[in-house]
Image (cartoon, helix red, strand yellow):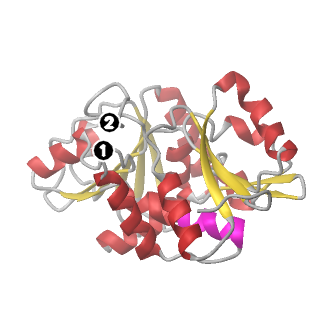
Amino acid sequence: MKITGRTKVVGIFGDPVEHSISPYVHNASFEAMGLDYVYVPFRVKREMLSHCVVAIRALHIRGMNVTIPHKETIMAFLDELDEEAEEIGAINTIVNTEGRLKGYNTDSLGYLNSLTEEMGFEPSGKNIIVIGAGGAGRAVVYGLVKRRPRNITIANRTCERAVALAEEVGGKYRSTRLVATGLDIKEHVRDCHLLVNTTSVGMQGAKGGLVVSIDGLPRDAIVSDIVYRPLDTPLIKEAERLGLRVHRGLGMLVHQAALSFELWTGKKPSIDAMRFTAVQSMEAP
């Protein structure tokens, strides 16, 4: 990859960010498609976030991905929000057009595309449990509710936050019953078709093992974890031990990355090529 003064810069803001394989995925796609872009990871502390957003404009950075813990906070520093991102209340992609910063959310559709492609799962009429009510949890809940499941139970360590999200989404989408709870989900698992972890629990370098107990899930239930590093999180390992179907986080990473890539460049990358690069980078020492 040759970098010059004409090279367009994109990247990712997060803390931590060392685990991210997005630089591998995007840079390989830029090179394969002959695009003069480079993708760089930036570790950004909470207290420096507003300054880093200013730097996007000052340095003429074309765009940015946003990950934990900034997906909600960063919205206040942008000029405009895509309609879906505004509804979700969290963004993961910024596009800089001549100094005007617009926020998008590609997590929501990226997750659904991955779930459909890999598992053939159709949310309509199903009972779903979503663990987490942060930025990623909001994206997953809003994406799922538009597919008209029967019930969505939102479980969060701080129950008040789950209650707030359930009331917010339930007020807009009456076709689905929204329930909030803490992390004790025993009474909700018996008829669950899909359980999704959207928290960072299980992520490389993060504290904690299993985010919830999944004993009692039906044998045909799917356990989904959006954490992709490691691929086999404690939750995924436990689900496999119980003989349940599993949906790992790498697919969501690839699909949301493809959507962000298109927003920055106006070109569609190869999903298969992105997935191949992602798997290779996971296997690299």
> Given contact means CB atoms under 8 Å apart, are the residues at marks 2 and 1 in contact?
yes
Q: Could you tell me the amino acid type at mark 2? A: Gly
Q: Is residue 89 left or right of residue 195?
A: right
Report the residue that reaches farthest toward the top.
Answer: 47
Q: Is residue 253 left or right of residue 34?
A: left
Q: Could you tell me the amino acid type at mark 1? A: Pro
Residue 174, above or below 268: above
Give the mark nearer the N terminus: 2 vs 1: 2
Closest to the camera, between mark 2 and mark 1, is 1
| Principal secondary structure, stretch drawn in magenta | helix
Relative image position of residue 58 (x, y in whole percent): 87, 43
Q: Is residue 94 left or right of residue 127?
A: right
Q: Secondary structure at mark 2?
A: loop
The stretch in magenta equals 257-265
Q: Secondary structure at mark 1?
A: loop
Q: Is residue 264 magenta?
A: yes
Q: Which residue is mark 2?
A: 202
Relative image position of residue 15 (x, y in whole percent): 55, 32
Relative image position of residue 249 (x, y in whole percent): 37, 54
Relative image position of residue 285 (x, y in whole percent): 29, 45
Q: Which residue is mark 1?
A: 230
Residue sitting at x 33%, y 60%: 279
Q: Residues within 10 Å of mark 1 (few under 14, many from 20)?
A: some
Residue 260, above or below 33: above
Please tell me which residue lies in front, 33 or 215.
33
Quadrant hosting residue 46 = top right
